[in-house]
Image: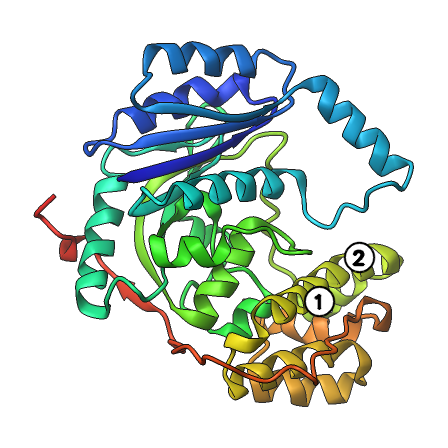
Amino acid sequence: MITVLMATWQGKKYLEQQLDSILAQTVPVRIVISDDGSDDGTRELLERYAEWYPKQIVLHHHQTPQERKALALQKSEGKERQRIPASAQNFFSLMEFVAEEDESDYVMLSDQDDVWFNDKVKVLAGRMRQMERQMGKEIPILLHSDMEVVDENLASIAPSFFEYQNCHPERSSFAEVLIENPVTGGACMMNRALLHLVAKAPKSCCMHDWWIALVASCFGVISWGDEALYQYRQHEDNVLGAQKKGLLTAIESRKGRGEEIARAYGQIFAQATAFGHRFWKEMTPEQKSILRAFLALPYQSPAGRVKNIMRHHFCKNSRVQTLAMCVTIPKMAGGQLSLDRLEAQGQRVQKDRPIPWKKEKEDESL
């Protein structure tokens, strides 16, 4: 079974197009949806679709608008610290639900405002089956594709998200994923082995897709395709910030934003710390060394950071971004990993480099 997970919130405007595109796939899928307290008609739209397609659409936990407001009040009063974004929490809830069912061979993630091409699932599933035959189903595998960037009316902005955002999907080693996420959730498919590793929400993460990529880079393999398999909709609530900057401009843009930058880097280092606490016993000595070196970055001088970054390849997509990072990581963003007393047990195989793939290699046996 192939299951598509969708987390929604205030998404009525574009949701119908996305649901229709998933239901129009050339291979059968099941869609499991969780709404996060929408009050714009999203919930009612989902309920109608569930009635129309009872065998294909499952409505999981629906948070009411009142529940969402109560939770927001608790956070504002300090009763609960938000360490995971709300949308990520929604996806983790869905992944845990599907993992407990243990009926899905492959799981995909869907944003509420995109549009899938009708062969997206077939292409990814074909490649996944091919890789599982080569590597074994016990190896955690994460696949992701390129996407076309479109405006709110689906007019093309750029044929390739990778090029538009200057992304380098080949930069998917454990060290590289610690500092930057190479994966977009809506472009992903994971196998059952990976699902069971990522289903439980960590104590802290930047986003669910980054956490999934981090786990796959450490314990399995990430593979990508350079064909766009869906339309990534860019609108007023979802604007991409693709800008080319020189080093001085990149550093200058960070001035006066100390607290904001500290929070952003703080989330990254908190995520790395949470990863260490979750998987320390399963990590190899080399992986532990990489993680410790990464968590040392905020406490080093700019010169020390340069040496550390170059040695372990904690590099961003561009040299400019990497050099700016060397100068601007604030010490207050640092995390701590106090796991010296834990013994390393049960090492897993790490695939250091991802595997690119082309559409023509897909499994035609579907």
Tell me the amino acid under the disc marked 1. Answer: Phe
**Residue at 66% in and 66% down:** 246
For residue 136, which quarter of the picture? bottom left
Q: Nearer the viewer, residue 280 or 173?
A: 280
Location of the C terminus by quadrant is top left
- Residue 171 shows in this picture: no
**With respect to residue 318, does 17 lie above or below?**
above
Q: Position of residue 151 (x, y in %)?
A: 49, 30
**With respect to residue 354, does 307 lie above or below?**
below
Tell me the amino acid under the disc marked 2. Answer: Arg
Q: Secondary structure at mark 1?
A: helix
**Residue at 47% in and 28% down:** 33
Residue under label 1: 269
Q: Nearer the viewer, residue 103 or 258?
A: 103
**Residue at 61% in and 22% down:** 10
Residue under label 2: 263
**Residue at 83% in and 38% down:** 75
Q: Secondary structure at mark 2?
A: helix
Coloured how? rainbow
Q: Position of residue 123 (x, y in %)?
A: 22, 46
Calculate the distance from the C-alpha at mark 2 to the C-alpha at mark 1: 10 Å
For residue 16, which quarter of the picture? top left
Q: Nearer the viewer, residue 226 or 76?
A: 76
Foreground label between 2 and 1: 1
Q: Nearer the viewer, residue 268 or 78?
A: 78
Q: Position of residue 3 (x, y in %)?
A: 34, 38
Question: What crowding class fits label 2: few (fewer than 14 Cα within 10 Å), some (14-19), or many (20 or more)?
Answer: some
Q: Position of residue 36 (x, y in %)?
A: 62, 27
Q: Say left or right for 57 vs 33.
A: left
Q: Say left or right for 204 vs 257.
A: left
